[in-house]
Image (spheres, helix red, strand yellow):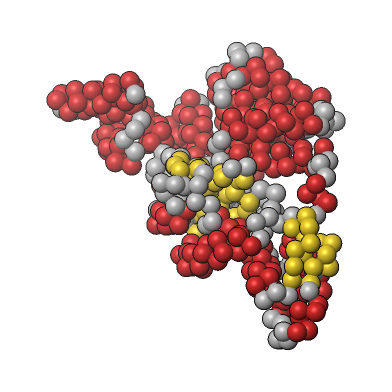
Amino acid sequence: MAIRGSLTEASLPDVLQLLAMGKKTGCLGLTYANNFGYIYFADGAISHASIVNRNLSTEEAVYLLFTWTQGTFNFEPGATPDEGVPMHSIDPQSLLLEGARRVDEWALIAKKIPTFDIVYAMDRHRMMAIERELTPEEEKLVPLIDGQRDVSALIAESKLGEFVTAKTLYGLLMTGYMMRVGVSTRARTPARTDDKATEHRNLGVAFYKTGMYEESQREFRRVDALRENDPEASFYLGLVALRQEQWPAAAHAFERYVTQQHTSRPAVFVNLAYAYEQMGEMDRARAAMADALSHGGRGDPLVQTNAAAMAVAARDYETADAALASARTLWGTRRPPPVWFHYAGLAAAMVNDLDRAIALLSEAVQVYPSYAVLWNNLAVAYEARDDFDDALRTLERGLIEDSTLPQLHRNFADSLQRDGRFDEAREAYRRAHTLDAQ
């Protein structure tokens, strides 16, 4: 379940503690004015954090995010960072005390250093008049403070991080060793088109990852306007359109991507096939899925699973069964996702291998107990084998794990009625009807 709110009503430390206590996995996205940051969690621990268009470590990003007392947050369960980003396992509690201290210090620092575009120079005469030993941080910074570099450049070249650099500069200002001499020319020079496009692209990706699709669409449209025929903008505009169930727009965006790229990754064709399928254009959908398989998808278990789903929709269960078997082989020792178990159980049942279907779905509910549809499918398989007692027990257990699926209540009512428990069956039908109406 996604979690949304305002930072004026729930502070970031409160949100972090909530996610840590719940051992959540997913992405917490935060927005403040034109700034965007996100914190990834794995089983309640912080695995990665970043602020768009800022080069910060995970800890530094979290500390800076603590200073955002306005804006909004959105938690998207299950979201994971891109491949290749540094991964950690940090207890949020370990950052809270230091974060609280830094928030107070940032408030003081910001009064003296309100922007990173300011350029400072050393007051050498003042330094000679008030001699004192420089700190290690000052030793790094003083040679760089030359009346040319702005604060952003000092942060980048000193490699001290934003907070330590700003805190050290604040100390130099307060002792009179340093004086302001102007604002960097970079701040007064209009950003290059490519730089602006990159900024919009980074924001668009961040918005998409945290479920803010309209905002993501807005940013990628800006990229599209700044970079003619930008394939990545087309790809993400297609993803957003899929999320918004705008099937023709999604198909158009992925078609553009294919024409913009001489070679396309299989995920593009999978998404294009899904858009065509939702539009009822099954011939084009099958052709796109064939392209996905021929562009490297035969070695990708997720592509094989998507191909199986399309085969199931076409009632070609033998083809689906074969694709799902191939996908499981490709996963090796890794655990397949719930969607694979869903289609694998269904395909096995439809090729009249109920024992295998029950074995697969029994495995599924052990590793994914919170997925009500898997319990429902297992109960249906038991019923098809005339194991009515096992079906009833499975439905009861599924309702304990997740009582939000109407079909689970409906099948439970059918089983209760078969068992002669008519009053309970009537109540189960009522709950199913209530959930259908929501």
In this rendering, position of residue 224 left or right of residue 379: right
350 versus 2 height, above or below: above
Instruction: Please state the horizontal and vertical placement of residue 60, each as a whole percent of the image.
Output: 61, 62
In this view of the protein, can residue 345 be seen by the observer? yes
Q: Residue at x 71, y 38 (%)?
A: 200
The answer to which image quadrant residue 239 occupies is: top right
In this view of the protein, can residue 91 be seen by the observer? no
Instruction: Please state the horizontal and vertical placement of residue 302, each as a whole percent of the image.
Output: 62, 37
In this rendering, position of residue 32 left or right of residue 182: left
Q: Nearer the viewer, residue 113 or 220?
A: 113
The answer to which image quadrant residue 312 occupies is: top right
Q: Residue at x 61, y 14 (%)?
A: 279
190 versus 289 height, above or below: below
In this rendering, position of residue 116 left or right of residue 332: right
Q: Nearer the viewer, residue 409 or 243?
A: 243
Q: Residue at x 51, y 31 (%)?
A: 343
